[in-house]
Image: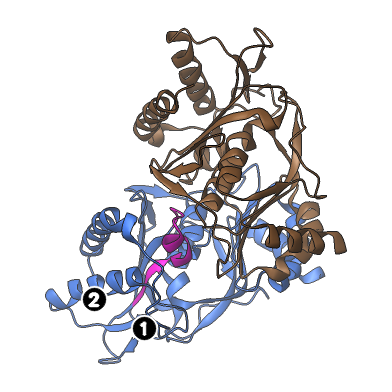
Chain colours: A blue, B brown
Amino acid sequence: MDIEFIRNIGHELFKKISTVRPQLNKTSLGQGASGDITYPVDRLVEDMIIDFFEKEGINVNIITEEKGVKTIDANLLTLIIDPIDGSKNAISGIPFFSTSIAIADGKTLKSLQLGYIINLVNGDEFWTKRGEGAFFNGKKIKTDKKSKPLIIGFEASNPYIAIKNILPLFKMANRVRCFGSTALDLAYLSIGALSIFVTPTPSRIFDFSAGILIAKESEATITDIKGNSIEELPIAFDTKTTLVVSASELLHKKVLELIDRE
Amino acid sequence: MDIEFIRNIGHELFKKISTVRPQLNKTSLGQGASGDITYPVDRLVEDMIIDFFEKEGINVNIITEEKGVKTIDANLLTLIIDPIDGSKNAISGIPFFSTSIAIADGKTLKSLQLGYIINLVNGDEFWTKRGEGAFFNGKKIKTDKKSKPLIIGFEASNPYIAIKNILPLFKMANRVRCFGSTALDLAYLSIGALSIFVTPTPSRIFDFSAGILIAKESEATITDIKGNSIEELPIAFDTKTTLVVSASELLHKKVLELIDRE
């Protein structure tokens, strides 16, 4: 799979969303396959991405937030799409949301082969191919292992319980951030803007797949919140996991110790 | 004071920042008057704003984050500037920061006369003049009093203690957000994108002045975290206060009850 083909899709999405933004609306189209509410912009972007693959005649299995799963052949690549990561921001007018596209060539997360995230507000692009490093707008990126101030990003779908559970972790933070887009959290961690990212409530495969491959290729350390590897989790529609992603192994160890102490 | 004069400044800042963004750098210029680190971009924007006033021959008292205070005459208007609200985002590469400009015609916060905020990433503009309502990119705005999901924004300079103190509040939240720019939190609350905004650690006069006037003119309810009015606080460089800002009075009452219960 050529990264330029995926980037071209990203550019078309960015152009489209730039023109429709003032008309983004909150009219729910009902629940998508994931159980989340589908908004017109979710469907628009998902349809555009799938169309690009179909027009090129590229056969892939598909896992998407809105439509669910389309399995053609277990031997084909699997395309994992979150059309709008940060839908709540997008439809309410907050300019912080993205499209996340990942491709896997096997059956578990360690087979993620390509990751691509585009910030649909300003066009920032992040991409990686397994083993080739990660890139931000064309420049090779690494996490910032000695970042000061230390900024912890998190996402939580059940804020009271989730934040209570990770509260001890905030002892090491100079600042926290909760932007509402897991894909962008992982992307900006990969360029050194966040030191740590945590999701105490399980994140879904569409939200994190591109982001964790970009983070890994930027030298981040990644486990679930118990410190377990997530590499053997299946490439499947209902795969969910908590996440701890750190700029360095040393930070990661400290994070797990603080969470565990609770 | 003409809002179009201030908007024109905003447009020039947006143009300038769009071109220099890739070069924004972390080189500290030392501590500004407020005690925060000054970055080149803070100084660049502050100088540009003050130049506009000087070139027009408009005499004002000035309160700014970086340079501090310049009092010319107690009878003049006072200009309150946060050149970059969200500096940490800006210099680390996260596209979420703004310029905040307020003007007061008296000695306390109730004399705030004009508020202007521009998102320097996508050019979103928010403005108000006292008694004339608030506007977002030219359209009159109101808070969303029945917003679902209920999203609580917060900022905290001392995350562990601050978040611990407001944790009960998160019981009423479907989601939380912490974007790192108080001005933009207040601006996006004013268009209905957030239901509640809280700063358990004191926010400074440059950060909140434009935002609270915009929020007030959008029908938000505003007090400090104890429920006290902030209207009588002085227009002064070292004025700081905690904030609770809610889309409606009813919500505000619930927020204060939940915080108080702790």
Check disc 1: other Cα within 10 Å, few if <14, some if 14-19, many if 20+. some
The residue at 22%/65% (across/down) is: A2
Taking B7 as reference, is A116 above or below it?
below
Residue kind at label 1, given as amino acid type: Gly
Q: Is residue A83 magenta?
A: yes
Taking A160 as reference, is B228 above or below it?
above
Q: Chain of mark 2?
A: A
Q: Position of residue A234 (x, y in %)?
A: 46, 86
Q: Is residue B98 visible?
A: yes
Check disc 2: other Cα within 10 Å, few if <14, some if 14-19, many if 20+. some
Marked residue nearer the N-terminal end (2 or 1): 2
Location of residue B103 by image quarter = top right
Q: Relative to the observer, which residue lies in front, B18 or A233? A: B18
Write the start and end of the magenta stretch as one range: A80-96
Q: Position of residue B251 (x, y in %)?
A: 68, 62
Q: Position of residue A198 (x, y in %)?
A: 62, 65
**Could you give the CA–CA distance between mark 2 and mark 1, rounded to whole angstroms?**
20 Å
Q: Is residue B262 visible?
A: no
Residue located beneath label 2 in the image: A50
Question: Do marks 2 and 1 share a subunit?
Answer: yes
Residue located beneath label 1 in the image: A106
Q: Chain of mark 1?
A: A
Q: What is the secondary structure assignment of the residue under circle 2?
A: helix
Q: Is residue B143 magenta?
A: no
